[in-house]
Image (tube, rainbow, N blue to C red):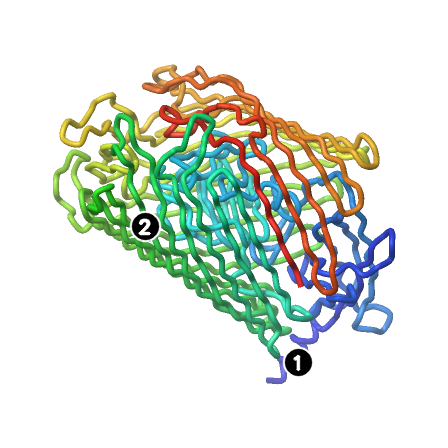
Amino acid sequence: MAAAGPLQAQHTAVIAGSVEDAETGEPVRHAQVLAEEANRSSRTDRQGRFEIRFLEPGALYTLHAWRVGYEPTTTRITVGVAGSDTSRVALRMSASPIQLQEVVVDGQSAPAIARNTDMDMGGKRLRQHLGTTLAETLSNEPGISMRSMGPAPARPVLRGVGGERLLVLEDGGRTGDLSATSADHAVTVDPLLTGRIEVIRGPAALLYGPNALGGVVNAVRGYVPVSMPSETQVVGVLQGQSVNDGVAGGFSVEAPAGRFVVRADGSVRNSGDVSTPVGVLGNTFLTTGNGSFGASRIGPWGHAGVSGSYYKSRYGIPGGFVGAHPHGVDIELSRRHLKAKGLLLDRIPRLPHLEFEGLFSRYYHQEYEASGTLGIEFGVLSYYGRLLSRTHTRRGNRLTSLWAGYRDYASAGLTFTPNTREWTAAAFQYQDINLRSLSLQGALRYDIRFVLPRDAGEDTRAGRIRNRTLGDFSGSLRLYRRFGGGFSAGIGGMRSIRIPGIEELFSTGPHLAAYAFEIGNADLGIERGLGVEAFAEYRSERFSGSLTAYHNHVRDYIYPRNTGQLNVRTLLLVYRQTGATVRMSGSEGSFALQMSPSVTLSGSGAYVRGTLVEDDEPMPFIPPLRGRLEAAYVRGKFRLSGSAEAARRQDRLGAFEEPTDGYVVLGGHAQYNLSLGRILYTFDLGVENATNVEYRDHLSRVKVIMPEQGRNIKLLVKALW
């Protein structure tokens, strides 16, 4: 017991401070303040005060502060000097029409490593683009498209890749759903109460999975609290939109309870069929409900907490064309999710920063024909665990992680995919080195998976069902250089792998909601990709801009090839899983220009070209050249903007694809912040497709029968107190 005192004393320094409005000097309430190196944060109270405890005396910390309606600010402070364990700081924040992307570190997502987060959507930008799904919310960002079969099962596509090649995470962990396996399966994350959405690329993305050529999407929800609030904090949200008579509402509350923090949230969403410029797209309704409760113990030794959540949804898949059910298919799904998470500081020799995480989810999914007949059902039990050690030095960070998972997959109904168990294990090592203007990041990961079908030995149209053991290395390097005058540039490379999924290996049978008769390939091997990218960025007081170019070469690229044949019993097109060599090249960029103190012009664009190398033919479902331009006017607490989104005609087509015409879609948005007593209100009013133009998205599976949604008026009201 005698040794505990010195260990605890290493983390007894405190940063106590205040946040003020730079123009009025008034306290800024509800501002989030983060001590980056310690991965600890706090939120300001009614007097604008905050306190971050359990810091190391004499250490240098970088403080980030942000809040809706204000420009983020950063400062550095050395704590516990001049004979005092408490260091005081005053931060001043001001409104700014330019929002620059930044490296953000948060206890709910990745550890405090130099992640070079490519995109971090939060605050007013998240509210402006908040949609029904994560994919819709992100669809205006450079390099991000949206795969859809109606609005409910939409899923993001990064740099032309999606599905199993794109990890969609919740608080840095697996969601436990089947959204990556088929276009009709929805993501079990509602963005309404999401605090932030981030896209992580480069070496740090390998922490979450071995296939990170496109990147990782992480929705920060904060189910398990990791910091002690100074007072009870409540958030309420109400959203409505006209295009589908949609209404959504939710709340979250976080409160101190002695040495514990408790947190709860809940939300509901209900919307009808989507209206388009030429009529209503039938059977596109959506109903969801979800809630969670979590609690953590916070102390100088770190934190430990648990949470439980429940998600339930019912939605429609439209029909009425070749390969689809005449009246569509209804899908019901539910997910139960348990999570334990903790951090130990200086409790184990040579492991000063040790994190642990455990996840359990039970996912259940049913698909019904219009008659009410159950066509297919899935059930998945998932268990995941991770240990993560971080060591910080003056030159950089070292991160070591061990990860293990188990999935029990079962299906019934018209499907003939065998019930299968999967065991997965991985080891990960990350290192970054920072030398003034130069930063080098590297990561190495090894994954192995044991696939154990219960019907091993049977011969099917997918091949012989048998046990498979698949494993290999992935790795990445990135070099980043900061030059003078606000200019920086870098280059990176990655070797990725993707192990085929259960459905890709063994599926045989109709999948009505996916418009496909699916045949797997039991002989599929590991997909291996090599990618390089170069990027440059410039920032000044009035202008910011970035440009990235990339090239990926993937061997044994797994995809469902449309055979052009029709299964005569089900009238579904036959898709057979196959492996091919592909080449994907593209670029993306963005800029923001402050034309006057109140007016900002910003824009972004992206292009990707995919080719099947052996056949020298285009890859299917590749998004066209797209761009977006926005002009914004900011005056105090009021912001008004107008936008134009454009896409080029896509006539570079895969087998059996149809071309889509180019289009220009106009929109507008207004935001206002209002403080009444203790409550901060934010109002967001937007209009999408303001001219009700008829256009079709190339990645939509229903574009042959209906265009995209028509004019949509959206209102979002958020209250913080």
| Numbered tag placed on residue 557 in the rendering | none
- Determine whether, in the image, residue 243 is placed left or right of residue 49: left
Sequence order check: which comes first, mark 1 or mark 2? 1
Residue 93, given in percent of the width and then of the height, sits at 80, 52
Which quarter of the figure is the C terminus placed in? bottom right
Q: Which residue is identified by label 1?
A: 5
- Determine whether, in the image, residue 462 is placed left or right of residue 350: left
Mark 1 crowdedness (10 Å alpha carbons): few <14, some 14-19, many ≥20: few
Residue sitting at x 50%, y 65%: 341
Amino acid type of disc 1? Gly
- Determine whether, in the image, residue 16 is placed left or right of residue 42: right
Report helix, strand or loop for mark 1: helix
Corner quadrant of residue 336:
bottom left
Which quarter of the figure is the N terminus placed in? bottom right
Can residue 171 be seen in the rendering of this structure? yes
Q: Could you tell me how far apart the alpha carbons at marks 1 and 2 are, in whole angstroms?
A: 54 Å
Q: Which residue is identified by label 2?
A: 332
Residue 527, given in percent of the width and then of the height, sits at 37, 34
Q: Kindly check if marks 1 and 2 are in contact, taking CB atoms under 8 A apart as contact.
A: no
Report helix, strand or loop for mark 2: strand
Residue sitting at x 48%, y 45%: 246
Compared with residue 83, is residue 276 higher up or lower down, i.e. above or below? Answer: above
Compared with residue 297, is residue 126 higher up or lower down, i.e. above or below? Answer: above
